[in-house]
């Protein structure tokens, strides 16, 4: 796209669909409004299924495995739901019809392994190929890295740390907990606790017998960045 400036033809910056005509924008607004009115209940409210990506099912499996809790049947149904949304390239997206996402895919891969799937299974081999082709586990987001740390599959020192002492910052300080959104606080506070305690478990050789496969080891970070790790059970090893 070009424009004329002082008699010269120069390139003009385009901002995606922001250069669309106002008539197109108004038409889209009208169509959206009509669709919402069509879906409105006669009593005046709207009702719809709350959906999210497969990271919720993966998180569900990982958390219950970590705690040694959960219903086996529900967890297997969660696997069915995960597999239902797999993309053709082997990965998983974070929204319907979207491209595969490295964090969602690593979570799904690990959830499948926690539920007893073999790394040599053709489906997991395809997933692993996609993960490695897209940078591997080091490319996942911080939340996914923390989950991997919980199972001893990632190093806490390689994850951005949040010092627990930030809760002591007063309200007048230029950064404090109450200057960020409540949704962010609900994530930040648990993250700092996890980073501060640096707890992890290891998965024993008898895997996938989930009920007996967890042993905890706790580590404390020295202020200088050193860590002390207690001895874990001798019959455990990284999964």
Image (spheres, rainbow, N blue to C red):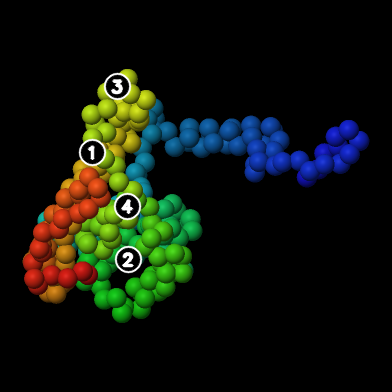
Instruction: Give the side of residue 186 with respect to residue 101, left or right.
Output: left
Q: Who comes first in sequence, dot 1 or dot 2? A: 2
Q: Which residue is mark 2?
A: 109
Q: Who comes first in sequence, dot 3 or dot 4? A: 4
Cα gap from disc 2 to disc 3, whole angstroms: 42 Å
Foreground tag (2 vs 3)? 3
| Mark identifier at residue 203 | none
Asked whether residue 218 appears in the rendered view, the answer is yes
| Mark identifier at residue 171 | 3
- Callout 4: 10 Å neighbours few (<14), some, many (20+)? some
Farthest residue, direction front = 224
Confirm or deny contact between disc 2 and disc 4 (CB under 8 A).
Answer: no
| SS class, disc 4 | loop
Instruction: Give the side of residue 68 with respect to residue 141, left or right.
Output: left
- Callout 1: 10 Å neighbours few (<14), some, many (20+)? some
Q: Who comes first in sequence, dot 4 or dot 1? A: 4
| Residue at 41 percent of width and 59 percent of height | 139
Q: Who comes first in sequence, dot 1 or dot 3? A: 1
| Residue at 13 percent of width and 70 percent of height | 236
Foreground tag (2 vs 4)? 4
Q: Which residue is mark 4?
A: 159
- Tell me where residue 198 appears, x and y as whole percent: 20, 51
């Amino acid at each position: 796209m070009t424009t004329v400036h002082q008699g010269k033809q120069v390139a003009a910056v385009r901002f995606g669909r922001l250069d669309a005509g106002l008539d197109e924008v108004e038409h889209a607004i009208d169509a959206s409004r009509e669709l919402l009115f069509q879906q409105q209940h006669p009593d005046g409210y709207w009702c719809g299924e709350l959906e999210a990506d497969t990271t919720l099912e993966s998180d569900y499996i990982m958390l219950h495995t970590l705690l040694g809790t959960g219903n086996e049947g529900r967890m297997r149904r969660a696997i069915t739901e995960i597999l239902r949304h797999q993309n053709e390239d082997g990965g998983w997206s974070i929204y319907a019809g979207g491209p595969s996402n490295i964090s969602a895919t690593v979570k799904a891969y690990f959830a499948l392994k926690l539920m007893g799937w073999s790394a040599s299974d053709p489906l997991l081999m395809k997933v692993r190929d996609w993960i490695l082709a897209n940078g591997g586990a080091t490319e996942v987001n911080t939340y996914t890295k923390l989950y991997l740390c919980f199972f001893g599959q990632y190093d806490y020192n390689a994850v951005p740390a949040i010092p627990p002492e930030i809760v002591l910052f007063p309200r007048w300080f230029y950064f404090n907990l109450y200057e960020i959104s409540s949704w962010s606080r609900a994530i930040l506070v648990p993250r700092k606790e996890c980073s501060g305690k640096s707890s992890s478990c290891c998965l024993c050789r008898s895997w996938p017998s989930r009920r007996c496969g967890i042993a905890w080891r706790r580590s404390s970070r020295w202020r200088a960045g050193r860590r002390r790790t207690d001895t874990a059970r001798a019959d455990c090893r990284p999964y």
